[in-house]
Image (cartoon, helix red, strand yellow):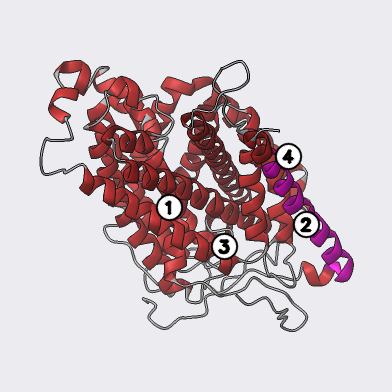
Amino acid sequence: MTTATETTGGKISLLRVLGPGHVWGLGVGIVLVGEYMGWNFSVGKGGMIAALIACWVAGLLYTCVAMIDSEVTSTVAAAGGQYAQAKHIVGPLMAFNVGLFLVFAYTMLEAANAWTLGFLVQTVSGMMGVTGPDGAAVTLFDKPFIVLTIIFLAWLNYRGVHTSLTFNMVITAIAFIAIIVLFLAVQPWSNDVLKHAELMDGKDGLLPYGWLGVIASLHFGLWYYLGIEGTTQAAEEVRSPARSLPLGTMTGMITLLLAATMTWYICAGLMPWEYLGTAATPMFDAARLTGSTPLMVLLFIGTVFATLASANGCINDASRAWFSMGRDRYLPEWFGAVHPVYRTPYRAIVFLVPLAVIFACYVPLDQIITFSILSGLLGYTFMAFNVIMFRNKWPLGSISRGYVHPLHPLPALVLLLLCATTYFAVFLGYGAQLLAMMVFYIVASLWFHFHRYKYVRRGDQFTMQWPRPLGH
Amino acid sequence: MTNFEMLEYGAWGLSGILGLWMLFDMIRTDRSYSEDLLTSSREGEIEDKIGGVQ
């Protein structure tokens, strides 16, 4: 890793040291934990088949997201990702909101990951059969491990992007391989281990809540892929953004589609939907049900690595978004600082640590996940409008694009339709939280419009060397 | 003290050390460099136009 202080003309910037593999590790690393936990709540909402439909419908949604994002970000290569896109294509108020969506989607996901790791440590300690003086079973307290996870990964991110994302790439690859090994170990070509026919027998096993359950399951179906769009946050730190970002994002999406389908197939063949719909760590449970100790160890390691990779990537992305907003004075400029040795947005990294710790330690997991999902969903809704405006203002041929997504505007329209359906799904289960979050973002928007915007460097915030948009 | 308690204290301790290290380094960096230099980063631009689709 390069840690020397390299300043150009008295300026310090983020370090361009990443390749497509890091981008893949960042995108898949953030998401893969969704295969290890979280996605299965969609089973509880609508049953096994509903969860499979949700897996593929959400896969379609995210394929649209990945295609749209790859095109736009290959032209707006700036830290902050969708925030920088919104700033250039839509306007400051949209950009402020998108920045907040990003920060909360990733910070809440980080908190959920730390919570899971704490839970896992506690569960494994309980399996060791240790008893106290009164003969009662003793387990480890989860809070120290939740806090350690967040602070250790923040420290790693603070020390440099190359080390933290190389770490991410390696542990993500191991976690993905663990899913493949489990898939092969349960012999998907036979009925010896997997019992799909027995577990999905009759209406209760298939669609216990009918088609309304299918819509409701979309809420947690997003968990299979939530965060793949985070690859764009690395735009100022990859050596070749126009090539690396689309490549890393699209290969990441293919990886996740494979992993999501394998995950559903394994778990649906091993656990009844009533249990699977509430399990905290379904893949680890699946390994336990095989009765194989090596598989249990491997899936325990896979779960730990997946949660670590996700939390690590989330710290990277949330801090870049927060840093970018500070750099443009959408937030206090103090947050826009780069460490002169490690070349990381160190103040943004440190500032977001307490927020993640508080949510991980004191807020229920399903509410943290819903906060993350809703923030992500608001961002995806923006992306559909954003790409339509982008193509209208700067048609093909007017500016250089590293990637052009096919069938425009079909992916944007499909994305909008799926987002609308998912809002309804969230409303069915978490209507009050949905409304509370909307109020929060409206109040934050009012604060930005009436108070904060006067501090923004209006001329300096548009950095892309683009021609005037069509019609202006 | 049981092994579990030692592990828990160890996790708290390591968290404290890493957290304090970051805070200490942040304060030291803020004092060693001017604010103008630390906040001098500007939004990036695409550097590799080769292979771009026009």
**Which element carries disc 1, helix, strand or loop?**
helix
* Nearer mark to the viewer, of 3 and 1: 3
Are callouts 1 and 2 both on one chain? Answer: no
Find the distance from the CA under tag 2 to the CA under tag 3: 17 Å
* A323 horizontally vs A171: left or right: right
Task: State if disc 2 and disc 4 touch (CB < 8 Å).
Answer: no
Mark 4 lies on residue: A447
Quarter where residue A79 is shown: bottom right
Closer to the observer: label 4 or label 3? Answer: 3
Occupied quadrant, residue A187: top left
| Dot 2 amino acid type | Trp
Looking at numbered disc 3 in the image, what kind of residue is underneath it?
A: Ser
Q: Identify the magenta region.
A: B9-35
Marks 3 and 1 sit apart, C-alpha to C-alpha, by 17 Å
Which x, y percent locates residue A406?
A: 28, 61
Question: How far apart are the alpha carbons under marks 4 and 3?
Answer: 35 Å
Which percent across, then down, holds residue A310?
50, 49
**For the residue marked with disc 4, what is the amino acid?**
Trp
Q: Quadrant of residue B9?
A: top right
Chain of the residue under the numbered disc 4 shown in the image: A
Discs 1 and 4 share one subunit: yes
Residue under the image location 29 percent in, 41 percent down: A263
Three-letter amino acid code at the position of disc 1: Ile
Residue A138 vs residue A338, the one in the foreground: A138
Location of mark 3 (residue) = A164
- Residue tagged by mark 2? B21
Circles 1 and 2: CB distance less than 8 Å? no
Q: Is residue A121 above or below residue A203?
A: below
Q: Chain of mark 1?
A: A
Precedes in sequence: disc 1 or disc 4 = 1
